[in-house]
Amino acid sequence: MSLNHVRPWKNIYRRKSRQIHVGSVPVGGDAPISVQTMTNTLTTDVRATIEQVQRCAEAGADIVRVSAPDEASARALKEICAESPVPIVADIHFHYKRAIEAAESGAACLRINPGNIGDATRVREVIRAAKDHGCSIRIGVNAGSLERHLLEKYGEPCPDAMVESGLEHIRILEDNDFQNYKISVKASDVFLSAAAYQGIAEATDAPIHLGITEAGGLTSGTIKSAIGLGNLLWMGIGDTLRVSLSADPVEEVKVGYEILKSLGLRHRGVNIISCPSCARQGFDVIKTVEALEQRLEHIKTPMSLSIIGCVVNGPGEALMTDVGFTGGGAGNGMVYLAGKQSHRMSNEQMIDHIVEQVEKKAAELDAAEAAAQATAAE
């Protein structure tokens, strides 16, 4: 249960945007901020791509993007979309026919730069295909591929150039009576991205797709994305996001959720609060947390778990979590349930016992939620 109603300093007031749909997923308005990722398999390897999409969906991805660089890839989307448990976004860059083929194949959204598609006739054909097949469109502005006339005007990629690019693309769609779009203004530089997103957020009410593009590897990219996206989300900007990492797409989903969970914007799975460990620890905190993260990955129910090595901060943290364990002496520690001391448990048996307690609590919370939904439906 959120405590924001009694802790106003924890509230984030989201920018008001209009709502669109990417397949069955609402984006913008009062919809939850959705988490996206992108496959890195060859799209023509249909089976490998479907398997990766399914792994990402299991990790919590609401939407998955798939590249369609050629006709074979665009046509392969038909089987991929049919078997995907989540909406598929087709990533299109230059050839307008790929966008039309992707829409015909069942893509829920087309990621394009209208200015790169070609002349007005070709843009109209893409928009007609999107309308005919119920596709939304993401305008994807990137600092690394700004239009030549904007680079000549501004001298280099800058926030004003990126915002102007985005507004030019919006005008193309709206001139063709198309409103079912969202927009991103990505850069690999955190400052450039943040400033561009603030500018576009003030200039339009379109839903905003957040991302720090080409952020880097798992560690560096996570930090860069957490700083850039976290600050924008804190300001209330952002309706859907993708964390771009040189890593398994599943890791992008995990990081995306952790960023949202840290700000109280989405809740999924177990939020583990753990200490960095020191000489006071009564058990090996680092190995314990590693084991628990792996063994609790299957839990989708939002809940909290504190794993603290000693009694300095342990009891205080445990008071605010569903399940907690605080290290003590003589090879055992204290188990907390619902913020209260419950019983002692040996360090050797602690991991199995904590997993059992978390699974039990998750089942209780799921049952309570199901009962509440049933009551509301009556």
Image (cartoon, helix red, strand yellow):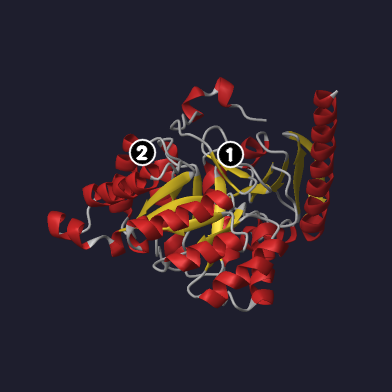
Evaluate whether residue 252 shows in this view.
no
Q: Mark 1 highlights which residue?
A: 32
Q: Judging from the image, what secondary structure is the residue with disc 1 in?
A: loop
* Residue 1 falls left or right of residue 162: right
Question: Residue flagged by tag 1: what amino acid is it?
Answer: Pro
Evaluate whether residue 43 shows in this view.
yes
* Residue 228 falls left or right of residue 257: left
Residue at 33% over, 54% down:
190
Q: Mark 2 highlights which residue?
A: 201
* Residue 4 falls left or right of residue 163: right
Question: In front here: 35 or 74?
Answer: 74
112 versus 372 height, above or below: below
Question: In front here: 311 or 291?
Answer: 291
Residue 366 position in % (x across, y down): 81, 39
Q: Quadrant of residue 113?
A: bottom left
Locate the C terminus by quadrant: top right
Question: In front here: 329 or 263?
Answer: 263
Residue 220 position in % (x across, y down): 42, 64
Residue 295: give its label: none
Q: Residues within 10 Å of mark 2 (few under 14, many from 20)?
A: many
Residue furthest to the top in view is: 6
Residue at 67% over, 34% down:
319
Residue at 73% over, 56% down:
296
Residue 99 position in % (x across, y down): 49, 63
Question: Residue flagged by tag 2: what amino acid is it?
Answer: Ala
Q: Judging from the image, what secondary structure is the residue with disc 2 in?
A: helix
> Of the residues under marks 1 and 2, which one precedes in the sequence?
1
Q: CA distance from mark 1 to mark 2?
A: 18 Å
Q: Are marks 1 and 2 in contact (CB under 8 Å)?
A: no
